[in-house]
Image (tube, helix red, strand yellow):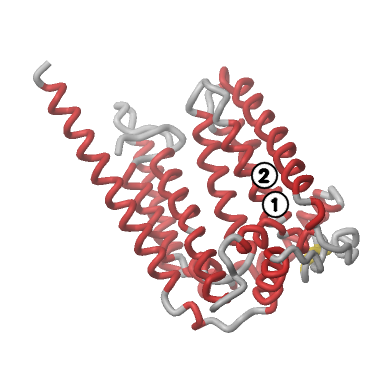
């Protein structure tokens, strides 16, 4: 009995320490993203998104249908008074602030699948990841889609750890927001499907599949309701979506043509170019950290027969 208060105080102290370090990581990530926001040139996509957000904010729907499938970005930026002064800085700062959602999600995922220290390390790596910093400082739909997609991963794990069905609600909201931010966000629906096979024990797969199915159905309803609410502001049909083109990009075959084999061919043909993106956007040091973590994790699982270590999908102590 005398040890219980001591253990409780130690646990509380660890939680406070974890919280403070996590907040420090988020502050560092935000500072890095807000520094010299005018340092990057204005990209064509940024100019379009900012222009569409400005038009939306004044009730002028003279932009492409659903803003080329990125409607939520324009709706969100319109809430930050991007009409002026300094509309570009405000819009980029808004995206930078919202990017903290993804950073916090990385911390939560790391803590959920391994430990508090793993979560904090994941947050640090994301906060300095060149690819993340590059996109989180621009008025693009990709960071917003990634924010809600990361949240969907958090709630996917959450749903797997509880017998209750209500985590399907935040999961549905995250999935709906990811798709509304950019149509490519529909790919995040793959995470719950993969989770059915790798997260729970065999006896819980049926329940988890039901939770994820409910989340997918609810996400569809939420997205449809959102679009119906602002139907007068959809914009004009420039035929791009009908021609399977989103902005300056072609729609992925797996989405617009439901052609899995064609999508695989596209991915295989772009393998070489993907490797070329590692040095400038990710960096070999971070890749090396990831490989070291993977090797250490495999070694830990092999030596964890005493029960002190657990599989990555289980919750570890912080």
If the image is split into quadrants, where does the N terminus sit? top left
Q: Secondary structure at mark 1?
A: helix
Quadrant showing the C terminus: top left
Q: Position of residue 50 (x, y in %)?
A: 66, 72
Category of crowding for the residue at label 2, using alpha-carbon neighbours closer than 10 angstroms: few (below 14), some (14–19), many (at least 20): many
Label 1 with label 2: CB-CB less than 8 Å: yes
In the displayed structure, 243 sits above or below 297; it is below
Percent x, y of residue 86: 54, 78
Furthest residue toward left: 2
- Which residue is most to the front? 58
* Label disc, if present, on residue 176 of the rendered structure: 2
Mark 2 residue element: helix
For residue 282, say whether it is visible: no
Q: Nearer the viewer, residue 98 or 82?
A: 82
Which residue corresponds to the image point at 67% horizontal and 62% vertical from the top-left? Answer: 74
| Identity of the residue drawn at 31% across and 35% down | 317
Q: Is residue 142 above or below residue 156?
A: below
Residue 111: image x %, image y %?
A: 39, 42
Does residue 33 appear left or right of residue 115 in this picture? right
Observer-nearest of 164 and 224: 224
Whether 316 is drawn above or below 184: the answer is: above
Q: Residue at x 74, y 65 (%)?
A: 269
Residue 12 picture quarter? top left
Q: Nearer the viewer, residue 175 or 226?
A: 226
CA distance separating discs 1 and 2:
6 Å
Q: Is residue 185 left or right of residue 318?
A: right
What label sits on residue 180 in the rendered view?
Answer: 1
Give percent across and percent down for residue 94. 52, 64
């Amino acid at each position: 009995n005398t040890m219980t208060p001591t253990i409780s105080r130690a646990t509380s102290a660890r939680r406070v320490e974890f919280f403070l370090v996590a907040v420090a990581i988020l502050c560092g990530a935000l500072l890095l993203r807000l520094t010299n926001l005018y340092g990057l040139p204005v990209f064509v996509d940024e100019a379009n998104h900012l222009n569409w957000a400005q038009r939306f904010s004044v009730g002028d729907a003279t932009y492409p249908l659903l803003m080329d499938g990125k409607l939520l970005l324009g709706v969100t930026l319109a809430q930050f008074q991007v009409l002026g002064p300094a509309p570009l800085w405000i819009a980029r700062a808004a995206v930078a602030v919202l990017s903290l959602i993804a950073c916090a999600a990385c911390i939560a995922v790391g803590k959920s699948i391994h430990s508090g220290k793993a979560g904090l390390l994941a947050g640090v790596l994301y906060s300095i990841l060149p690819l993340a910093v590059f996109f989180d400082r621009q008025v693009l739909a990709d960071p917003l889609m990634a924010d809600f997609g990361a949240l969907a991963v958090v709630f996917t794990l959450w749903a797997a750890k509880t017998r209750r069905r209500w985590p399907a609600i935040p999961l549905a909201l995250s999935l709906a927001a990811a798709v509304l931010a950019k149509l490519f966000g529909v790919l995040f629906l793959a995470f719950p499907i993969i989770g059915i096979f790798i997260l729970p024990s065999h006896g819980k797969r049926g329940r988890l599949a039901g939770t994820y199915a409910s989340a997918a159905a609810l996400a569809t309803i939420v997205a449809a309701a959102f679009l119906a609410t602002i139907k007068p502001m959809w914009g004009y049909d420039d035929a791009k979506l009908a021609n399977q083109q989103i902005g300056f990009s072609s729609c992925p075959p797996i989405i617009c043509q439901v052609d899995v084999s064609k999508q695989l061919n596209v991915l295989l043909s772009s393998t070489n170019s993907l490797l070329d993106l590692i040095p400038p956007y990710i960096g070999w040091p971070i890749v090396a950290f990831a490989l070291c973590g993977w090797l250490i994790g495999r070694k830990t699982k092999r030596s964890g027969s005493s029960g002190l270590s657990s599989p990555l999908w289980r919750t570890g102590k912080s």
